[in-house]
Image: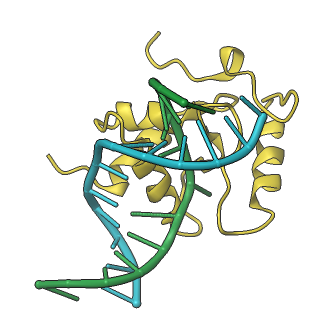
Chain colours: A yellow, B green, C cyan
Amino acid sequence: MKVTYADIYDVIRLIPRGRVATYGQIAELAGLPRQARRVGYALSALPKGAAVPWQRVVNANGEISMRAHPGADRMQRKLLRLEGVVFEAGRIPLERFQWRPKS
DNA sequence: AAACTGACTAATA
DNA sequence: CTATTAGCCAGTT
């Protein structure tokens, strides 16, 4: 079946406040195993003003991934800290903050 | 229709 | 720690 960017956005909307998810994790939940990259592609195409908590998506290392817009990584960090997510040595301890759906 | 564009990950050296 | 490699495709122009 065809998985569109909108489907990926739907998964990202499920991430609770104060939690983060990795690209690979979202890819898997969206039915796209091993296609983490496409999640990144979808986010880069995210329309301005879309109701998607994009800041809760980080890479597998708990770090913020680079993007075209300069300074955006700094803002992402700020937004996450406001939600209670802690950064240690420039990264998020995923064992504590990664979203675990269903459990 | 065809070319171009991108927020990744895991494995290996 | 860094570098390289293979795996992946919808949306926009």
Residue at point 59%, 47% (across, down): A53
Q: Quadrant of residue A41?
A: bottom left
In the image, residue A3 sits, relative to residue A19, either above or below, namely below
Q: Which residue is painted at 70% across and 15% down in the image?
A: A96
Horizontal side, residue A73 vs residue A45: left or right: right
* In the image, farthest residue toward the top: A103
- In x, y percent, where is residue A40? 50, 52
Image quarter of residue A16: top right
Q: Where is residue A67 in the image (x, y as percent from the top left)?
A: 65, 61
In this rendering, would A77 be left or right of A15? right
Q: Which residue is drawn at 56% across and 32% down?
A: A21
Measuring from the top left, give residue A86's x and y in whole percent.
83, 28
Q: In the image, is residue A101 above or below residue A3?
A: above
In the rendered structure, the answer to whether residue A81 lies left or right of residue B2 reads: right
Q: In front here: A6 or A98?
A: A98
> In the image, is residue A26 above or below residue A99?
below
| Residue A18 in view, yes or no | yes
